[in-house]
């Protein structure tokens, strides 16, 4: 039977903060969390992981409801299981509007249950350095803000929509930025997370017996 013990994560440098049958949460030295969640019910996703055109607006609306913006979403494989990689951002200080916090997650959906792994990092000290540096590179352009919002169709407020400075190509220039760290953590989790063999053999999300497919919902 699947359980939270069916997922193995390498966390030797982290301190266990809390655990139950449904979740485990670790903290690093800075108090930043990594958590594992087990949902013992069929996933409520509108489509399987490779249906990005369906999942993106769905997750975007979920993020907005939680006061966050969607930075990226992509189908990946974690221990050979079709999964969803997601990064969202929020405002660190609602009063001033300054600072950002980034949350990264990997969702591993099976037909009858799912796992979600999350990491969360925040800006420390002087905020907005990454954005300011990339904007400075565009200072000679006639319209230096043109193309700043990566997806013009994103309904999120500009401060929550993904901007040019948050593209992966800038991560190496700002290795300590929370977004760069979130992406590195997700890369490491994708490479190291394992699922016990008997659970890996269970039906995946989208296989026979799941909820209606998204195109059947209105029938």
Image (cartoon, grey):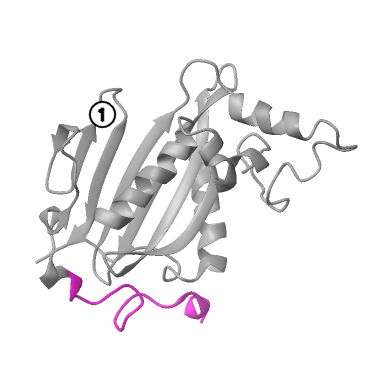
Residue at the image position 54 percent from the left and 59 percent from the top: 56
Residue 34 vs 91, above or below: the answer is below
Q: Nearer the viewer, residue 132 or 25?
A: 132
Where's the N terminus, which quadrant? bottom left
Q: Which residue is mark 1?
A: 28
Residue 167: tell me if it is visible.
no
Spot the residue most to the right: 142
Q: In screen coordinates, is 79 left or right of 169?
A: left
Residue at horizontal 54%, vertical 16%?
A: 126
Any magenta on residue 192? no
| Rendered residue at 32%/56% (across/down) | 190
Q: Is residue 10 above or below residue 215?
A: above
Residue 92: x and y, percent? 49, 25
The picture places residue 212, in percent across and down from the top left corner, at: 40, 77
The answer to whether residue 204 is left or right of residue 24 is: right
Image position of 15 with respect to 161: above or below? above
Query: Which stretch did the figure color magenta?
Result: 200-219
Residue toward you, 150 or 48: 150
Residue 206 is a magenta residue: yes
Residue 34 visible in the shown view: yes
């Amino acid at each position: 039977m699947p359980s939270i013990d069916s997922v193995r994560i390498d966390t030797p440098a982290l301190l266990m903060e809390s655990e139950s049958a449904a979740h485990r949460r670790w903290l690093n030295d800075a108090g930043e969390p990594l958590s594992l969640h087990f949902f013992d019910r069929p996933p409520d996703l509108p489509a399987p992981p490779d249906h990005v055109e369906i999942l993106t607006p769905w997750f975007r609306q979920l993020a907005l409801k939680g006061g966050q913006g969607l930075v990226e979403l992509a189908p990946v494989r974690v221990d050979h299981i079709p999964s969803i990689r997601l990064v969202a951002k929020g405002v660190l200080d609602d009063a001033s509007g300054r600072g950002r916090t980034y949350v990264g997650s990997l969702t591993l959906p099976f037909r009858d249950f799912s796992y979600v792994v999350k990491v969360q990092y925040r800006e420390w000290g002087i905020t907005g350095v990454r954005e300011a540096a990339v904007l400075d590179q565009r200072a000679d352009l006639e319209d230096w803000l043109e193309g700043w919002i990566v997806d013009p169709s994103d309904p999120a407020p500009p401060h929550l929509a993904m901007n040019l400075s948050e593209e992966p190509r800038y991560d190496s220039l700002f290795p300590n930025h929370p977004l760069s760290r979130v992406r590195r953590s997700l890369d490491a989790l994708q490479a190291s997370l394992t699922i016990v063999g008997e659970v890996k053999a269970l039906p995946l999300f989208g296989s026979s017996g799941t909820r209606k497919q998204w195109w059947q919902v209105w029938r």
